[in-house]
Amino acid sequence: MGSIYTSSIGKKLFMSITGLFLIVFLCLHATINFCYVIDPQLFAGGCEFMALPVVTVMTPVLAAGFIIHIIWAFWLSITNLKARGNQRYAVSNKAQADNWAARNMLVLGIIVLLGIALHLTHFWAKMQLQMFVGGEEMDPIRLMEMTFSSGWTVAAYIIWFAAVWFHLTHGFWSAFQTVGWNNDIWIKRLKCLGYIVATILFLMFVTVALTAYCRVNCGCC
């Protein structure tokens, strides 16, 4: 029984640590993408950084990390549902878990996973992957505007960004709680910080998509 408990705690710690690492990557990615709103050429310069070999290799690794993160979330959800009903994450009381994001982390994770697949197909496969295999990579500005020239694509991405927002609002503070920051004072602060970080990232990504759409279809921005 003790070994099972230890294994479960270890998996939760792994999910928390990888989740926090992926949040850092999202912040970097959002910052580089937002350069497009300020100046497309600045964005192109940021893409040159993302095209560095170490980053090119790390992108699929990070994608694999998302996949493992979601698979383990699924496994933990099934295990916890069998053992403790609806308690799916490491929370100190029912009130903290009794919100929409906490109850639907698995569904949100699946949407995030599908969004990653879409993003890798639209961008990584046509830029970093091409450089990695010696092919011809597309111009990042042209690729950005080509991808978001369709309203349906913009809508699909916004749904993905919204899923990431919901996932982060719960996952941010839950990850810190799992690694030990679980007193009442810090939980309140981390919940607030989680909403701030998630909202900033959401607005940055949405602004980039809408700006690209407007520049292509309206000739503005």
Image (cartoon, rainbow, N blue to C red):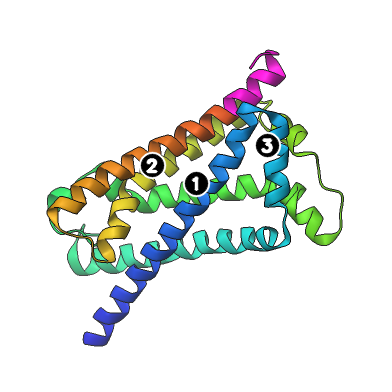
**Residue 104 shown left or right of residue 99 in the figure:** right
Q: Residue at x 44, y 44 (%)?
A: 164
- Percent across and percent down for residue 126 are 76, 47
* Amino acid type, callout 3: Phe
Magenta span: helix, strand or loop, mainly?
A: helix
Which of the marked residues, 3 or 1, is nearer the chain's N terminus?
1
Q: Which residue is mark 1?
A: 27
Residue 87, compared with residue 199, is above or below; it is: below
**70 within the magenta span:** no
Name the secondary structure under disc 2: helix
Which of the marked residues, 3 or 2, is nearer the chain's N terminus?
3
For the magenta stretch, what is the residue range? 209-221
* Amino acid type, callout 1: Cys
Q: Residue at x 27, y 86 (%)?
A: 3
- Percent across and percent down for residue 7 are 32, 80
Q: In this orientation, does residue 89 appear?
A: no
**Residue 172 shown left or right of residue 160 in the figure:** left
Q: Which residue is mark 2?
A: 197
Residue 106, picture quadrant: bottom left
